[in-house]
Amino acid sequence: MSETRTTSVHAVGGGRQGDTVQGGGRAAAPLWWVWLAAWPVTAVFILSNAATPLYVLWQRDIGFSKGTLTVVFAFYIVGLLGSLLVSGVVSDRIGRKPVLLPAMALALVACLIFATAASVAALTVARLFTGIAVGAVVSAGMAAVTDVAGPERKRIAALFASCAMVFGAGLGPFLAGVLSETLPAPTVTVFVVEAALLVTAVLAVLRMPVRRPATPVKGAWVRVPAVPRGNGRQLIQGVAVFAPGITATSFVLSLGPSLLSGLLGTTSRIIAGVMAFAMFLAATGVQFAVQHLRRRIILTTGAISTTVSMIMLIIAVHASSVPVLVTSALLAGAGQGMGQLGGLSLLNSSVPPQRLAEANAAFNVGGYVLAGALPVSAGYLSDAVGLTGGATVFGVVLMSLAVIGGLVVLAARRQSPEHAGFPDGERVQLLSRRDVRGRAERSAPPA
């Protein structure tokens, strides 16, 4: 906490002195550069879900079950988690660009494999490479947004980085659905377009005003990512809400098209893509709507949203109601968005810059472990007992986890009632002012 307090005091007393890019003494970049720094995150996340509406075509041409489909999705999680073991630490040690540029190259290779895929193995490798690239951008890329924003704009940096992630995740299936239905070569065209977007993201990374860290962290290069001592409570609160939220959206992405196909009797890729886009558009919009609320209120509301989403999912599959299913997807998106924004904001406000990428990695590991395991189980269960039964079990389990997440946040709030009335971002400055006043009072001569 001492490092964070020092930053706050400099920012107040020294004007632009505290407004610097990590690793250098330059003034913080203009706001448009903060937006541009978030573009590589968006570009890679477009790829992360671009294949979603196309699996119906690959299932028809190659032939594989719902369980196999969720395994293909799970290899994305495997690549992502493996990447998070390395990318956060490496980024904090040698800089953001040396991690982001190889990630962009791997994403371009994944586009090539997707465009030429003729087997489950090819799809699996493409998803694996995509996961590795995503792991790099959620750690190094999102930390780069904070670096470019500077220490006085940490909250807006968390907002931009979080929105870049969910907006890209929604734009991918929307573009894929529309392009594959309206243009020739449905499993090729979207990845040609995505490759072009990735090239522009590479150019943004090359020009990004970030420098190597001045004081790199020590320790093993490959390790389970963690947060500094004293930041565990913030991590636990964020993961407790973010993990159920992103698991809910992962389920909609993996089995949502099958649910729509069963309910509507259609395999329209545009409809599946639009539902996914609407879900992540809700995740993006809700973050702008709640950005000024206290972080624990954001997290609690996110847990409630995910809980209600699962209730609506269970109702939708039993009542065969498309409107209720879409409502469930929108609430799932809102739950992920608020869990993600609240968790990232807590970390941004308390973790020192030289450990931020690793902290982001730890946060995402906590979310994606559940997001990988639970939908895979639901996929195989759906093959065994039917989609209605599998979705019902999934909804009950995830609803329980979301309730537990909300209780974790409320319990943490009760443990620190002294600061319950203050936005989390103001607590450090409050403590700093108290420390200064206390030292002044102790050093004052007796009356």
Image (tube, helix red, strand yellow):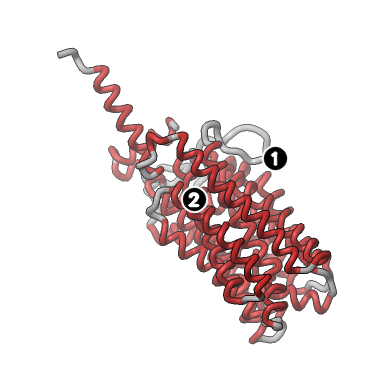
Q: Amino acid at mark 2?
A: Thr
Marked residue nearer the N-terminal end (2 or 1): 1
Q: Nearer the viewer, residue 426 or 320?
A: 320
Of the two numbered discs 2 and 1 in the rendering, the one whose residue sits closer to the viewer = 2
Q: CA distance from mark 2 to mark 1?
A: 33 Å
Q: Amino acid at mark 1?
A: Val
Q: What is the x, y in percent for residue 336?
A: 55, 58
- Left-right relation of 256 to 299: right
Q: Residue furthest top?
A: 446
Callout 1: 10 Å neighbours few (<14), some, many (20+)?
A: some
Q: Residue at x 47, y 62 (%)?
A: 36
Q: Nearer the viewer, residue 345 or 308?
A: 308
Callout 2: 10 Å neighbours few (<14), some, many (20+)?
A: many
The tag on residue 300 is 2
- Left-right relation of 205 to 63: left
Callout 2 secondary element? helix
**In the rendered image, is residue 307 in sight?**
yes
The tag on residue 261 is none
Give the vertical position of 196 relative to 133 (above or below): below
Which quarter shows the N terminus?
Answer: top left
Q: Residue furthest left?
A: 447
Q: Residue at x 41, y 55 (%)?
A: 291
- Left-right relation of 211 to 358: left
Callout 1 secondary element? loop
Residue on which the image places disc 1 = 222
Q: Residue at x 27, y 27 (%)?
A: 437
